Image (tube, rainbow, N blue to C red):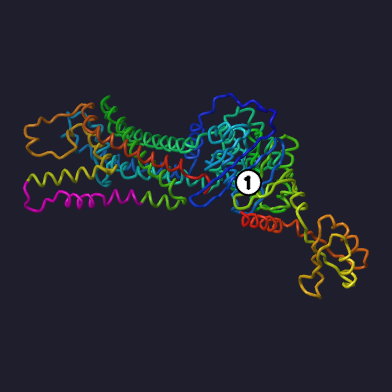
Amino acid sequence: MATPVETREPSRGWRVVARKELTDHLLSARFMVLLVLLALAALGSVYAAASGIRDVAPQASGRSALFLKLFTISADPIPLSFFVFVGFLAPILGIAFGFDSVNGERAQGTLPRLAAQPIHRDDVVNGKFVAGLSVIALMLTTLVLIVAGVGIVRLGIIPTAAEIARLLIWLIVAVLYVGFWLAFATLCSVILRRASSSALVAIATWLVLALFAALLVQLLAGVLAPAPAGADAQAVLHNAQVEQNLARVSPITLYEEATNALLDPEIRAVGIVTIQQLDRAVVSDLSLGQSVLLVWPQIVGLVALTVVCFAAAYVTFMRQEIRA
Amino acid sequence: MADPTTISAKGLTKRYGDLTAVDHLDLEVQKGEVFGLLGPNGAGKTTTILMLLGLSEPTEGTIRVVGLDPAKKPLDVKRLVGYLPDSVGFYDALTGRQNLRYTARLNGLDKGESEKRIAVLLAEAGLGEAADVPAGTYSRGMLQRLGLADALVKDPQIMILDEPTMAIDPEGVNEILRLIRSLAEERGVTVLLSSHLLNQVQAVCDRVGIFVKGRLIAQGRPDQLVADDGPVTVELGAHGDFATLERVLREVPGVIGVERPNGRSSRLWHLTARPDSVPAIVQNATSSGVDIWHVRRLGTDLADVYHHYFEQESNYGNAR
């Protein structure tokens, strides 16, 4: 060899990519706009919840999770609780930081140059995903801290250790949920060559899932397990179960079920509960471990959906030609 | 290293379904030379380059870059090879310097040293003043020069330049060509460049390969490719006694045919002649008393060269 090849360990390419992408995200206009929007929405909901919490406080006295009510109850004039807000707006976050990740490089003509550097090709997509997930985690954590801070100051309720733990686990679930949308948007950005079409497809999917999935699932369940008016209890129950299981294909359902159980220790089941089953049940809070156990399948489902989307994006990207 | 071959490809083939983009290409580039891949658009130049870099996998054939197989050791190859893609792009929001910094980091270069190196490269590329301006504001020529600097950040042994002068104004082209030439002469870098413009390839390349429809149909020094093969066409623009001129021209040894493509009244003459007779043609034409306005050897046009080799190619194809 004419010149000795460098013996230095190759730098971890994905870290360099992630670091650059993270800087880009944090300095981008979209980050600022989304942060301000989400912060306003969060503040609005916590303000309403704080006034609403006074009304529930008398009945809730003696319950352990009063602090968490900040995040879960809604009151006039803002009819959405904090976690519903996050559930609704989080997909936007994921899509915003993913929809142009790969096709943006293509459009700027930087992909061939990037790929010609001594990094593995998957470093590009891995680094970008890590950067996107970091920004999302950062934003959600900030929001939760803002809400918690406002709650502590305005209501004077100090969260217990169990509540903080619940909140942390919920935060992980929320990041996972946004991570699913990030992975999905990344997949769109790999498959579709234009950033605008990628954004459109991602947003359309989100809207369809958020608005029409319930209708579709109802229709499908009606076909698969018909329960006409006057059908016996067995058929009705079967229909409801089929409907619920179908709905659980959507990450939105999974996120909502997991959130409900994690933020409200009184919730003891996410499935269908018959009146017989509730008979003589003692009203008491579930421990944290039990709540997590209750929604473990939902959490695993979310992880699985995210992994599937990311894997699809990864494989497609690895097989694509670098040249446009 | 005993073997001076830096880039070698043997039987290199790339097929996309039924389309054969590169067809049994044999290529050797020696250390320290500037090699030009000359061919029309769509000839498979970019595909070949991507395979040399390990960015695209060959369907058949072997490649060695400094003795390494890019398909098996892509990182080692990419550490040694600087690449300027065609219509190179940079991150618009980052400055020229920040863009190069990113490349340095991706190459795992030491921060302090790469910072100095980047400053030097930017200055050499004539971007000293624009270094801290967002790359989105750069002109095409500036981007191209930034691309050259970018490919040099890793201090490569080999530079692969894909259409380095495309879409650049003539002044910018000269600047780029000067930079490329200095790469080979001052830094001892091996350069492989692709282009569809013969005069530019002639200006900088030590050797040229003519690449048509995925096949390398000829290679050699640029002047050989043009002159060695058969008669050339010389175009004369003349004023004066045409009868005398025609007689004089026909008497020059080596002249095969004289015709006036635009008719009897035209001042344009096309001579078919052996390449070595060109000086005599000019001499005799001038001394015949007519005024010669211009002389152009049409054989140096790339279109003619392609045409020439295409004819050979199709004859060869028929003979098979």
Given the current orientation, which residue lies at the most extreme bottom position?
A: B265
Q: Which residues are magenta?
A: A204-232
- Which chain is disc 1 placed on? B
Viewer-nearest residue: A197 or B199: B199
Residue that appears at 61% across and 48% down:
B45
Q: Quadrant of the N terminus of chain B?
A: top right
Residue in the image at 26% along x and 52% along y: A212
Identify residue for label 1: B162
Q: Is residue A167 left or right of residue B151?
A: left
- Front-most of A237 and A34? A237
- Please say whether residue B7 is one of the residues in the magenta stretch: no
Name the residue at the front extreme.
Answer: B319
The x, y position of residue A99, in whole percent, is 43, 46
The vertical placement of A320 against B282, above or below, is above
Q: Nearer the viewer, residue B89 or B227?
A: B227
Judged from the image, the secondary structure of the residue bearing numbered disc 1 is strand
- Residue A74 position, x and y percent, is 25, 42
Q: Quadrant of residue A81?
A: top left
From the image, which quarter does the C terminus of chain B lie in? bottom right
List x then y, in percent, for residue A117.
Answer: 56, 36
Query: Relative to A260, does residue B16 appear above or below in the rendering?
Result: below
Q: Residue at x 60, y 29 (%)?
A: B109
Q: Tell me the crowding category of disc 1: few under 14, some 14 to 19, or many 20 or more residues within 10 angstroms, Cα based.
A: many
Q: Is residue B107 left or right of residue A77?
A: right
In the picture, residue B4 is in which quadrant? top right
Residue A194: horizontal and vertical position, in percent? 46, 51
Label 1 is placed on what type of residue? Answer: Asp
